[in-house]
Structure formats: structure tokens, C-alpha cells
Amino acid sequence: MDIRELTAVDAAAYRELRIEALTNNPDAFGSVLEDALRKPVEATAENLASPLAVTFGAFSEGRLVGNVTLLREAGKKMKHRANVVAVYVTPRARGNGVASRLMEELLDYASEWEGIEQLYLTVSSHNRSAIGLYERFGFEKYGTEYRAMKSGDEYTDEDLMVKFL
């Protein structure tokens, strides 16, 4: 297993994995599949090159099997904060510690990113395995956003979590 920061060169592989994530787990993300399918790979490459974000990828036998993104707030009063977003591990790689390795890499990076003091994330309230992962890495729930997302007639509540560095 190789964990490394993704660059614009990885845009096609990342876009493919993102489409898989939105197909397999549509209720876990605020984005929708239709938008991801319309988004050109060049836009994905631009996102991967942003100075306000870093995305880590997990590779198994040369194939991208997981990712996590750390997105720094841009505002002058908010730049001490960053958000953990777009966490996904493909089903065939789950149960092998991939998510834990990605979180370790992200937290190491965050602790070295000048000025970052706290990390935030949201997670579907019913996603017990993800909540357990985040708790093992020191994230604490500070609230719930009820009906945070709506798909058709179905609502998804999200737990709000924070980790102070």
C-alpha cells in the first residue's frame, strides 16, 4: 500500500474513484453523481493543484483505492481551520486499514500546515464505521445537523465533529 499526495497527474484516476464513491454511497456525500459526470477531468486537475487543499490517495498495485482531502478555510479569520472532506475507500480495499492510513497521513500533514489549529468534518449519523474511525483519531462530536441532505423524499442527518491539534 502506497499513500501519497495526489497531483494534477492523478486527476483521471481520482475522478474515476470519485464517480465510484458517488455511485456506491450517494447518501454519504453532498455532491451528486450527475454533477461529477459532467465535470471535466481538467477541472479535477485544477482542484488537485489548489493551494488551499491537499488530497491523499491510497494505491494498491498501482491502482487508486482510497482518498481523503483536507480543505483549508480561506478567510482571514478562518484560516486556522481546515475541513476533512471526500473520504472514500473502494469496497474491495476496505477492512485492510486503508482509511486509517489515509487519516494518519492527513493528520501528519495538518499538524505541519502552518497555522492550522483545528479540523472539522461531517459524517452521516448512521455511518457507524466512519464515526468510529474518526473517534479513534481524536475527533469529537459537537452537534448534529438534522436533515442536512435530502435525496428525493429521504433525509440524512449528519454528525458534526472536530479535532483540535
Image (cartoon, grey):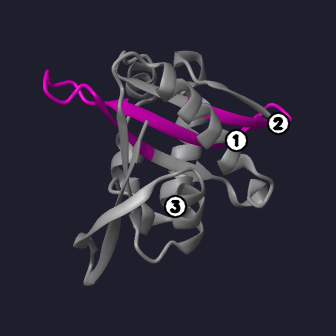
Query: Callout 1: few (<14), some (14-19), or many (20+) C-alpha neighbours within 10 Å?
Result: some
Does residue 101 appear to the left or right of 26 in the view shown? right
Q: What element carries label 1?
A: helix
Examine the image and state in which quarter residue 141 appears.
bottom left
Q: Residue 78 placed where, x, y %?
A: 19, 30
Q: Is residue 2 above or below residue 140?
A: above
Q: Name the residue under label 2.
A: 1
Query: Callout 2: few (<14), some (14-19), or many (20+) C-alpha neighbours within 10 Å?
Result: some
Residue 62 lies in magenta, yes or no? yes
Does residue 75 appear to the left or right of 73 in the view shown? left
Q: Name the residue under label 3.
A: 23
Examine the image and state in which quarter residue 64 appears.
top right
Q: Residue 89 placed where, x, y %?
A: 64, 52
Which is more N-terminal, label 1 or label 2? 2
> Separation of disc 2 and disc 3 at Cα?
24 Å
Q: Which residue is drawn at 27% across and 78% down?
A: 152
Q: In which quarter of the image is the N terminus?
A: top right
Whether label 2 touches label 1, CB < 8 Å: yes
Q: Residue at x 28, y 28 (%)?
A: 80
Q: Identify the amino acid type marked 2.
A: Met
Q: In which quarter of the image is the C terminus?
A: top left
Which segment did they paint magenta? 56-85
Examine the image and state in which quarter residue 105 appears.
top right
Q: Mark 1 points at which residue?
A: 101
Label 2 vs label 3, nearer the camera: 2
Residue at the farthest bottom position: 153
Residue at the farthest front position: 165
Which is more N-terminal, label 3 or label 1? 3
